[in-house]
Amino acid sequence: MAVPLIVSQPTAELDSVTEVLTAAFADVKAAVLVERPVVVLIHDGDLLGQGEVVAASVAAGLLGLVRALALEGAKAGWRVNAVSHRGDEDARSARDIAEWLAGSDLSGQLIRVGTAHLGKVWP
Amino acid sequence: MSGQAIVTGAAGGLGRQIAARLGEAGHRLLLVDLDQAVAETACELQNTGASAGAVVADLTHDDGAAAVATAVREQGGSIAVLVNNAGITRDARVKNMEEADFAAVIAVNLVAAMRLTLALEPLFADGGAIVNMSSRASLGNFGQANYVTSKSGLVGFTRALALRWAPRIRVNAVAPSLVDTPMTQAMPPEVLEKLVARIPAGRIGTPEDVAELVSFLSSPEAGYVTGQVVLACGGRSLAA
């Protein structure tokens, strides 16, 4: 099995949002085109907009990227997924799940670690 | 609430209709676009009785946002409504999508909206409303990795700004699907027919459909709605 690409949510300022999302696209594109599974780690609070506006925009953008590539690569067997977590207390679980996801046939999934998202919208 | 309503991408079919609807609601309009035709749009709306000014600005640069802020001050009063509608497409399958085309779409559809909104913060009236034009495609779409990322990013921006600026300003997003604009009219009829067949409502959306929703979210009637994404897609987001 190809070594998975695990992408952590990059930090960004307003002026670097384009750059970091484009870099993420380039990395993910390069991986899927050689059938390397991809898992993107996202901060769950950012998906709900609970942090800084730039971080929230990047987090949601990355989730969109995951969905777009999973949809486009469904027939080709691209495996692109996302795991969201709340930080240090969930980070290990998130990593474990990311590695499991990368070895599975699943694609286009968002797995949310922890319970803080319960009762909130699904991003 | 009346007061100034700013609509970006106002030279296009959807932006023009949104502006017209907000004009009917009693807002003084400030139309913004990179396309100089926005001045003609303002004249057309003036002829219908609306108060409308126009700014030609490139919102991908700080100068563009500053030009809009200057125009707001010149028109006088504060901002009641901002509709971030400006957007572009550079569609391609992932394997053929150049990084430059990915970046261009992010810069215009997402970052320009963020830059303008944040720059205008001091000029908003209490009780103001922002509507970000996202897309049903933010949930995923073929051949639009850049567009999907940008419109999904706008959803994140909407949520975060709604929390940050509450209770002073409400922030929501509208996510249309296929809308009858010059862009869709240019599609091959057989392609358009296939796309419409996947819409439970049985028809393409109209600019009026979307403008009405934007107007509602901008109005005091939606005063308890913030941080939400409202899909205007004829049920497309649910159908198989």
Image (spheres, coloured by chain):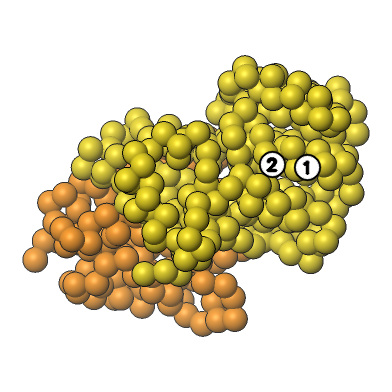
Q: How far apart are marks 2 and 1 (CA)?
A: 6 Å
Q: Identify residue type, mark 2.
A: Ile
Question: On screen, B50 above or below A105?
Answer: above
Image: B98 above or below B176: above
Q: Which of B202 and B126 is in front in this view?
A: B202
Q: Residues within 10 Å of mark 1 (few under 14, many from 20)?
A: many
Decide which of A92, B108 is in the foreground and name it.
B108
The reply to whether the C-beta atoms of the residues labelled 2 and 1 are less than 8 Å apart is yes
Asked whether residue B104 appears in the rendered view, the answer is yes
The amino acid at mark 1 is Leu
Same chain for labels 2 and 1? Say yes or no.
yes
The residue under the point 91% across, 34% down is: B77
**Residue receiving disc 1:** B22
Tell me the crowding category of disc 2: few under 14, some 14 to 19, or many 20 or more residues within 10 angstroms, Cα based. Answer: many
Rendered-image quadrant of the N terminus of chain A: bottom left
State which chain is coloured yellow: B
